[in-house]
Each structure stands twice: as structure tokens, then as C-alpha cells.
Amino acid sequence: MRLKNYLLNHAYALVYSLGQISRTPLSSMMTVMVIGITLALPTVLYVALQNTQQLTAGLDNVAQMSLFLKKDTREENAADLAGQLRSNPDIATLEVITPEQALEEFRHSSGFADALRALEENPLPFVLVIKPVTSHPDTVARLQATLQKLPEADFVQLDMQWVQRLYAALGIVQRGVMILAGLLGLGVLLIVGNTIRLGIHSNRDEITITKLMGATDAFVRRPFLYAGTWYGVLGGLLAWLLVSVALALLAEPVQHLSTLYGSRFALGGLDVSGTLLLLLIATLLGLLGSWLAVGRYLRAVEPV
Amino acid sequence: MIQFTNVTKRYASGQEALSNVSFDIATGDMAFLTGHSGAGKSTLLKLIACIERPTSGQVVVNGRNLAHIKRAQVPALRRQIGMIFQDHKLIAERTVFDNVALPLIIAGLHNAVETARRVRAALDKVGLLGKEKQLPVMLSSGEQQRVGIARAVVNKPALLLADEPTGNLDPDLAAEVMGLFEQFNQVGVTVLIVSHNLGLISRFQHRILNLEKGCLLSHAPLIHEAPPCA
């Protein structure tokens, strides 16, 4: 019975708060739109970031390093070392290039065939061409350090340094998006808080009257908390709509561009978990914003 | 029902609204409170409804000492009191029905059938049945006052407080409204009415408390004897 009453109290506040919002349709709509646009911006960035990660995931097998062995390394030693390194879990593939193979290849590709023939001995060392299991900077760096320490190692050349740079740049962008999302979230909090504050202000008389009739603080508070939550939910839905429309508009040009690059990359949309997260955050921001406003302003409205 | 013992109320501005006021209104009684404007009548009502707290002295309402009442306990106290205001204090955006139903909803009554029954009974009593769907602004001042009375009695409170309920009414309507209060009193409700319409209230056989500059002047028949005004 108590629970039923409690739920009915909440149902009343829920319906009442909706009525309150619909009574001022224009200003309510403005609030919802501001929240929607504010939330849409970080969401679009989030989707863009996810798409970039999807793009770079395709780069996993492009990182490659060449381990140049010391000039005096003998063929058995090189083969031994190659055998040892193949058991390293960070290494996906390993290929041994002998000085003869290298010279042959160089002869073919460089056009210096005659000049090379004049050499008395082969100046090229053994080279181990290594592909790490991923291009993730951590793995690559770790592997590079390991290889560098080998006694036979002359030097390690990372062929895909730009991948590392890309990852580093992505890291910065990711953090930037997080900071921006945090700031905009704070903005939503203030927008909801301010709207609720105005609502409290314009309903002063009504609040006073209900308090005179013996309304508890919770009774007075509830409709405002629900109103804030509604603003959050509606703003979140609008943000989702805006992002979906924006992505739909971008999909075709992106497709066109990737075709020009000979890629089959297609722009990914906001996935289910992303959508749920957006709505959850929007709802919580609405609730929290109204909570702050209610805590700050409602107590002050007392009958005099 | 209401006991004031040496109650003094001084506002932050330094103005003393009530000075050492003592009186007692028994359960089921009806009394008038009169005096010039600024005599402290409104302050006295506010102390009963716990809108203001006394500076010193003791206020007991329905067995509850208001000196020890916590903020969270105030709503429960107010639900036992039906309050009527000179300016009606109706919610302009809500229909007559919703206004009268408000105390029931606040008290947690969610049964729509029961709510409708009690709202209609209260409106019937004040002669406004059929106006449920109207907004307060569509009613005359006298009708709005009666909506306020219906709202005050819908929850069957033990105590009715009325602040100048006939202030804006013509003599016939005023007498009618006073008659209503007398009817509620006859079914056991304690009634305290603030009014400076001496001509009207002297027609009833009820106690008259007379406040002047914060002091209680005449209060026969009264249990406590208040010391003379300084």
C-alpha cells in the first residue's frame, strides 16, 4: 500500500511535470533544442573518432621494422637469431634477407647494376624483416627496444613511424573530445538548472500555496526533478536525431572519397551502445541539473 | 485546540507584532479575532500554521507544541488545518476542481473516484457545484472565496483558520459565508476567523479576541488571564 502510494505520488509528479512543460511550449522547446545541439556536438566527434579508429585498425599489418645485423655476423648466427625471434609473441612474421639476396634485389631495382658489379665484396649485412602482431605504438616500441639490445643488432629501422605519429595524434584528439564533452556537459547542467530555476520562479505562488496546504518538500521538489529529467531525455533524443541526420548527409561524400582512394570504407553511424550512452548521459545531466537548481532555490520559497 | 502562553513575536526589523499573548481555544469552539490592521492578527494566524515561529512563549496546536516541531514535521501539522485567505490564494492556471482537489493530492489520495466525490461534496457545501471545470478568474470574488473555503474543508481538517474571509464581499454574501463557517463548527470543527467587520461578528454568539498593538484586550470568556498591556 505504501509502495503503491509512493508510485502514485511519482506518477502524479511525472504527469504534472509534463503538463508544466507543455504549458510553456516555446521556452520548453528552446531549452530542449539548446540541450540537443549541445549534446550533438560531442556525439558527432565521438562518432568521428570511432570511424578514425576503424580506419586505423586496418593499419595493423603495415608496421614493419628492419633489423640490420652487424656486418661480421655469420650466416648460422643470423639463422639462429631468426629462430629465437620467431618465438617472440610480439612478432607476427620474420623474414631473413641475406646480403646476396639484398644485393640481387638492389641490382634489379636500382639500375646501378654495372656499378655494383665493380664492388669487390658485398657491403650489405644480414637483414631481418619483422612484422609485429599489431601496429599499436606500445607493442612496436617494446619490440624495437628488445631488438636494439640484441648483441648482433647493428640498428633497427622502423618503417612505419608515421603510424606511431598517427596514434599519438589520435590520442590528443581523443583527449580533446573528452575535455570538450565535459565542458558541454557542464553547459547542459547549467541550461537545465537555469530553466528549472525560472520554472520555480514563475511557479512561486503555486509552490507557496501547496506548502500552505501541507505539501512536503519532496512533493514540491518532485515535479521539478521530473521536468529536468524530461528536458534531458528530450534533449538527448534531439541530439540523437541531429547526429543521425548529420551522418546521413555525410555518408555519401565519404563513400565517394573512399572510392577515390580505392577503399571500401563506409561511414559508421552511432551504434546501439553509443545511443544508449548518449540518452543515459542526457537523462542524468537533466536530473542532476534540476537537482542542483531545486536544492538551491526551492527551499527559499516559503509562505510568508 | 489552540493554546498561546505568553507568546511574543518580534520580527527581524525589531517590530514587535505580538506582546505576551495568552489565550486558549478549546476543541470544537468558534472564535473571532479582531483588531485594527497592524494589530498582529495575521502574525497570530501565521504562528498557528507555523509560517512564523514565536520569539518567546509557547504555541500548542492540536496537542503539538510548535516550539519543538522540526521543519520536516510542519507539513503534517498544516494538513490538519484548513486555511482560508483574504486573497483566496487559488492557483490561477488550474480549474476549480483541481484547486479543491489539491489538499487531497498533497495528502496522498490518488483514488480518482473518491477524490471526485469529496471535491464535489465540498463544492456542494459552498454552493458551487457545476463550476468545477471553470478557472478561478471566471468566477466572482465571492465565488472564489467559496472555492477557497471548499478547498480548506475538503480534507475534513480539525481546525479552520480564516484570514478576513469576508473582506471583499458585500454584506449579504459576507453573512452567508459566516453562516457556512458556523455550519462547519456545528459538526465539530474548531474555527478561528480574523475579521474587523465588528457589525457582522457581533451578531454571532461566539468569543471575540481583540488585538491591539500586539496585545490581547478583551477575551471573555477566557481561561488564561493575560497580564495588562505594557
Image: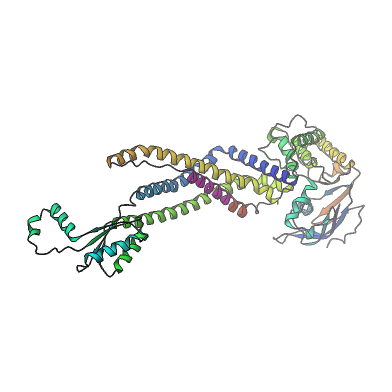
Number of labels in the image equals 0
**Residue A286 included in the magenta stretch of the image:** yes
Residue A121: % across, % down: 11, 64
What are the residue bounds of the magenta stretch?
A: A267-290
The type of colouring in the image is rainbow
In the picture, measured across the screen, residue B90 lies left or right of residue B175, that is: left
Question: Residue reaching furthest bottom?
Answer: A151
In the current view of this chain or complex, which residue is farthest to the front?
A: A76
Q: Is residue A250 above or below residue B72?
A: above
Q: Residue at x 82, y 49 (%)?
A: B34
Q: Position of residue B111 (x, y in %)?
A: 75, 38
Q: Is residue A209 above or below residue B47?
A: above
Say whether residue B153 is left or right of residue A304. Answer: right
Q: Residue at x 11, y 53 (%)?
A: A111
Assign the magenta stretch its main secondary structure. Answer: helix
Choose top left, top right, bottom left or bottom right for residue A148: bottom left
**Nearer the observer, A41 or B3:** A41
As for residue A224 lying within the magenta part, the answer is no
Q: Quadrant of residue B145?
A: top right
Q: Relative to the observer, which residue lies in front, B74 or B201?
A: B74
A223 relative to A178 in the view: left or right: right
Give the position of the N terminus of chain A as an image quadrant: top right
Where does residue A120 sit, x and y in percent of width and height? 9, 64
Q: Nearer the viewer, residue A266 or A69?
A: A69
Task: Identify the residue at image location x=74%, y=48%.
Answer: A214
Q: Is residue B198 visible?
A: yes
Query: Residue B203: in sight, yes or no?
Result: no
Q: Position of residue B14 (x, y in %)?
A: 71, 62
